[in-house]
Image: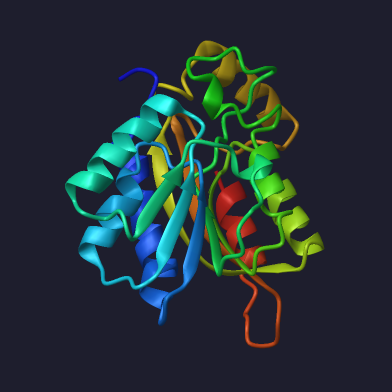
Amino acid sequence: MKDIFFCPEESNFYSNCLENFVIRNCKKSELVVEFGSGDGSPVINSLLRNKFDGVIHGFELNSSAWKVANSTIDEYDLTNKYIIHNSCLFNSSQPDADYLVANPPYLPAPDNDIYMPLLFGGVDGATITNELLSLDYENVLVLISSFSNPISTLNLAKQNGYCVSNFMVLPLQFGYYSSDPKVKKHIEKLRRNQMAFYSGDYYFLAGVLFKKCQDSVIDLSNQLAQVMTNL
């Protein structure tokens, strides 16, 4: 369906990040909040592969994606583990949770008149990611693109008291959405201003676990910045 985000490689990567950085670290009945659940497949796949005693509350604006997600949740009898609300997290009461997780919209463009407007991440692509890091959750897992002003996100996270606790990186080819001529041209402009990093048709997508800084957290921010800009 054209009005639902579809990129199996990216969804599988998000699922792997969820499993490695969140689900397998949950020792009790943790509550997880998810921004932008889409069709729900990354979380559903993770829940089917792992034991998880908590509850994930997802928020998804796209009604078509929300309906597909709930149908699959019902099919796999996960209604007590994964609850998706057809609303925006930013406009909700923002439930208390141990983790906030998201594969947020990160496409940079002058405006949201692109193939799929809900994938618009602001002029530099980092707007929504940076908003999520301003909600003050203890642990935040987000996917960050190397062409979406990643250094601004790392700087903002530091200002908000976060350290990079762990990360995984996936090289990805520009796909259907990022190859939209309007988007690609804008990314080229960002690159000239050292706000986007890519090589040929490839960019990096990083799954990053941010934790509120404390003595026990080793900060990997500098290592991540080197990886993301080394293109």
Q: In this view of the protein, which residue sits in the foreground, 146 or 22? A: 22
For the N terminus, the image quarter is top left
Q: Is residue 212 above or below residue 122?
A: below
Between 50 and 11, the one lying in front of the other is 50
Q: Quadrant of residue 8?
A: top left
Residue 40, given in percent of the width and then of the height, sits at 35, 43
Q: Position of residue 90 (x, y in %)?
A: 66, 43
- Whether residue 96 is visible: yes
Q: Quadrant of the C terminus?
A: top right
Residue at 74% across / 47% down in the picture? 152
Measuring from the top left, give residue 201's x and y in whole percent. Answer: 44, 29
* Image coloring type: rainbow
Looking at the image, which residue sits at the far right? 159
Outermost residue toward the left in this view: 75
x%, y% of residue 39?
35, 37
In the rendered structure, the answer to whether residue 104 lies left or right of residue 134 reads left
The answer to which of 227 and 2 lies nearer the viewer is 2
Quadrant for residue 225, please give it: bottom right
| Along the line of sight, the residue nearer the viewer: 204 or 102 | 102
Q: Is residue 120 positioned above or below 129 on the image?
A: above
Q: From the viewer's perspective, is 43 left or right of 84?
A: left
Residue 150 in sight in this render: no
| Residue at screen point 19% across, 51% down | 76
Give the answer, above or below, for where 140 lies relative to 204. Answer: below
Q: How many marks?
A: 0
